Image (tube, rainbow, N blue to C red):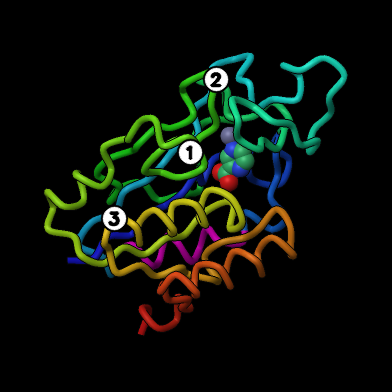
């Protein structure tokens, strides 16, 4: 069985949002069309409490995209984004959610960031996504959404680690940084993941 994971397709990651991914909105028609080709569609939602430690505003003298060490992990500091209950944290209005059977929220612990839909960055806590997928007899996982070089990439890596045959839908994602996108694809491939285009499924 095949699952499509729609990663963080939220207003704050779209043009005009607090942490806008360039051309993030360009994936919407593609991710909407892809859904009917899957046995299961699941979404993730970045869902931070106000004052989250991944926000530059939580650290005196720091600005967005500075890098610090937080609980022994390297942490990029972000603009405030996806604050629980705000319009920016909502799933994109133009995302078709009719087939989305579950939404996994992440980033709720104020002390630790959570790029992957499976685990926080310190792997302290699981979201339950892996067991949910196994419970639905999923063996193949396809990832799409935002951002290609952060949450999509970390989710794809964890899907491999969890033993799923994993596909990164290159044209159904957009990156914060072009350099990060290339590095993410190279690393994901080297771990045994497959990079594909949505056209291979949309026939
Ligand atoms: C993301 C940075 C911070 C993402 C989330 O969804 O890729 N990136 N929080
Ligand atoms: Zn976040």
The earlier-in-sequence mark between 2 and 3 is 2
Q: Residue at x 75, y 25 (%)?
A: 56
Which image quadrant for residue 81? top right
Mark number displayed over residue 91 = 1
Q: Residue at x 81, y 35 (%)?
A: 66
Q: Give the CA separation, mark 2 to mark 3.
A: 25 Å
Q: Residue at x 29, y 69 (%)?
A: 165
Which image quadrant for residue 191? bottom left
Query: Is residue 91 located in the magenta-colored stretch of the structure?
Result: no
The residue under label 2 is 111
Mark number displayed over residue 58 = none
Residue 21 coordinates in the image, percent (x, y): 69, 50
Q: Residue at x 52, y 57 (%)?
A: 153
Which quarter of the rendering shows the N terminus? bottom left
Main SS of the magenta part reads helix
Q: Give the CA separation, mark 3 to mark 1.
A: 26 Å
Magenta segment, which residues?
A: 26-35
Mark number displayed over residue 162 = 3
Q: Bin the neighbour count of mark 2 within 10 Å (Cα to Cα): few under 14, some 14-19, many 20 and up.
A: few
Q: Secondary structure at mark 1?
A: loop
The earlier-in-sequence mark between 3 and 1 is 1
- Is residue 153 placed above or below 53 in the rendered structure? below
Q: Quadrant of ligand 1?
A: top right
Q: Secondary structure at mark 2?
A: loop
Identify which residue, 181 or 71, lies in the foreground: 71
């Amino acid at each position: 069985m095949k699952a499509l994971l729609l990663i963080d397709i939220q207003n704050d990651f779209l043009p005009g949002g607090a942490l806008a991914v360039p051309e993030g909105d360009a994936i919407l028609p593609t991710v909407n069309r892809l859904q009917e080709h899957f046995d299961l569609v699941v979404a993730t939602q970045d869902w931070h409490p106000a004052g989250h430690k991944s926000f530059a505003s939580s650290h005196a003298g720091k600005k967005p995209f500075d890098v610090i060490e937080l609980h022994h992990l390297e942490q990029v500091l972000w603009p405030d984004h996806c604050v629980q209950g705000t319009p920016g944290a909502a799933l994109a209005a133009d995302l078709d959610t009719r087939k989305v059977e579950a939404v996994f929220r992440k980033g709720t612990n104020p002390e630790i960031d959570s790029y992957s839909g499976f685990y926080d960055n310190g792997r302290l806590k699981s979201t339950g996504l892996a067991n949910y997928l196994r419970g639905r007899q999923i063996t193949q996982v396809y990832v799409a959404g935002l951002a290609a070089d952060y949450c999509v990439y970390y989710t794809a890596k964890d899907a491999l680690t969890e033993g799923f045959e994993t596909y990164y839908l290159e044209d159904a994602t957009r990156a914060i940084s072009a350099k990060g996108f290339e590095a993410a694809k190279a690393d994901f491939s080297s771990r045994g993941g497959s990079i594909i285009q949505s056209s291979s499924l949309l026939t």
